[in-house]
Image (cartoon, rainbow, N blue to C red):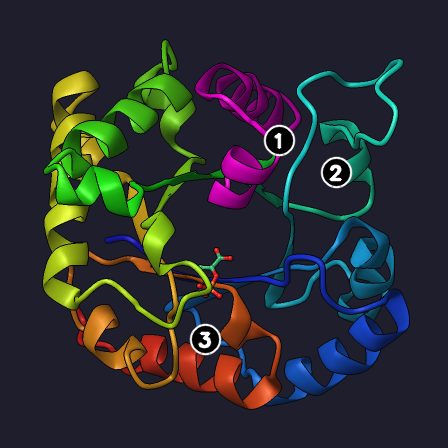
Amino acid sequence: MRTTLIVGNWKMNKTASEAVRFVRELAGVLAKDPAVEIVLAPPFTALESVHGVLGSVSHLALGAQNLHWESQGAFTGEISGPMLRDVGCTYVIVGHSERRTLFGEQDGDIHKKIRSALANGLRPILCVGESLDERELNRTDAVVTGQVAAGLAELTAEQLKPVTIAYEPVWAIGTGRAATTEQAVAVHRAIRASIASGWSMEAANRMRILYGGSVTPQNAPSLLRESEIDGALVGGACLKTESFATIVLAAKNRPVH
Ligand code: PEP
């Protein structure tokens, strides 16, 4: 039984004071439900103030959008795993396609970040996804499972336990053009099969695989109806209380699989 997970990736939006106002409103609207885990991933500058609003026992967990693989040192502008833990994070997004395409993150960097997250007690959300060209060349499964294998290389099945994978087709992120439910399910199946062959069937059955890419209140019910889709990584639609709450409601109303 995999608990549904809804993650709001705020990207570079909201100042710390805007974040406080927003999270106060959100926390009032999103009731606790053991069937759905919710993670808020504000910018680094708002982590501390959001944690202050949530408190340490909130039903809303705190996540970061990135981390450096070293714990400390001469890495100007970077943030480490111990820093994220200290400020109350329990999750961290790793290898988002904007990090890969705009900031040149490679699979090897992402692998080191996954290891650092795990070493620091953070639950990594590994993002994978194909470009439009790759999809049109029928390379989707190969690209995505290759990113999974590289990101999780040499981890044991035990080490995989805190890991979540987010399938986010690059062409769907921020474009308003989400994958169809059928497209998402097909790739989720390929990812799960690659975990089964690389690790074990048990590890595959346990792995949460989220869909991300233009998730909206309109398409969330169809996506989340599928047993293969264990939740959503939400960008644009997580910035407004109503749209994020409606997506969370779709998760709460999904059939029990
Ligand atoms: C994302 O940032 O991971 C994302 C999926 O963005 P959007 O929902 O805006 O496409």
Q: Residue drawn at (47%, 42%), measured in percent from left and top?
A: 97
Q: Which residue is mark 3?
A: 33
Q: Position of residue 65 (x, y in %)?
A: 63, 46
Q: Which residue is mark 1?
A: 121
Q: Give the CA distance from mark 1 to mark 2.
A: 8 Å
User: What's the magenta region?
Assistant: 94-120
Q: Position of residue 47 (x, y in %)?
A: 79, 55
Q: Residue drawn at (56%, 82%), measured in percent from left and top?
A: 30
Asked if residue 103 is among those painted magenta in the image, a careful observer would answer yes
Write down the quadrant of residue 77 in the picture. Answer: top right
Pair 2/3: label in front? 2
SS under mark 2: helix
**Amino acid type of the residue that numbered disc 3 sits on in the rendered structure:** Asp
- In the image, taking residue 34 as reference, residue 59 lies left or right, namely right
Of 189 and 33, nearer the camera is 189
Binning the other alpha carbons within 10 Å of mark 3 as few (below 14), some (14 to 19) or many (20 upward) gives: few
**Amino acid type of the residue that numbered disc 2 sits on in the rendered structure:** Arg
Q: Which residue is mark 2?
A: 85
Of 165 and 82, nearer the camera is 165
